[in-house]
Amino acid sequence: MPRARTIVQASTIAAAYGALTILTFQFLHMLAWGPVQFRLSEALTVLAFLTPAAIPGLAAGSVLANLFAYAGSGNSAVLLDVVFGSLGTLLGAWWTWRFRSRTWLGLLGPVVTNALVVPTYLPFLLRSYGLTEIPVLGLSPLDAG
């Protein structure tokens, strides 16, 4: 029974993460995906403090949400976000679970992993949309160096 409970918890978390991201897209459009993001679903990353089922659940939810973005855009570069963005979410959730006894350190997991992973593919994603700078911020990561 514990294995079934873990699968149900992970599936529920995945569905909630995906649904909240898609809902954010419906109301805030470009803030759900792209170089500057606001995702209500990121609030769910704290669930990794409570259950290890959140680790695969959050990663699967990220895959679902990013596949939705890919299906909507048709841009094959979005597959970078499907793979690497979801990997960042997986690592962040694992970090949170691993360091759950030290709350401040556990909360850094999703922040640090996304800060390290996303910039590695963001320039390619921006270029695929014909952007040479990050909208709103006016930063130009493609011209650096």
Image (cartoon, rainbow, N blue to C red):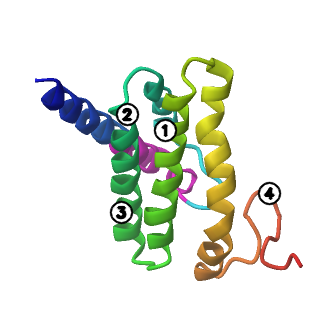
* Residue at the image position 80 percent from the left and 57 percent from the top: 137
Mark sitting earlier along the chain (1/3): 3
Tell me the magenta residue range: 18-33
Seen in the picture, residue 100 relative to 84 is either above or below; the reply is above
Mark sitting earlier along the chain (3/2): 2
Task: Please name the residue that numbered disc 3 is placed on.
Answer: 67
Q: CA distance from mark 2 to mark 1?
A: 7 Å
Task: Please name the residue that numbered disc 4 is placed on.
Answer: 137
**115 in the magenta segment:** no
Quadrant in the rendering for residue 2: top left
* Disc 4: CA contacts within 10 A as few (<14), some (14-19) or many (>=20): few
Q: CA distance from mark 2 to mark 4?
A: 32 Å
Q: CA distance from mark 4 to mark 3?
A: 26 Å
- Of the two numbered discs 3 and 2 in the rendering, the one whose residue sits closer to the viewer: 2
Q: Quadrant of the C terminus?
A: bottom right
Quadrant in the rendering for residue 118: bottom right
Provide the secondary structure element on which disc 3 rests: helix
Task: Please name the residue that numbered disc 1 is placed on.
Answer: 93
* Disc 2: CA contacts within 10 A as few (<14), some (14-19) or many (>=20): many
Q: Mark 3 and mark 4 in contact (Cβ < 8 Å)?
A: no
Seen in the picture, residue 63 relative to 9 is either above or below; the reply is below
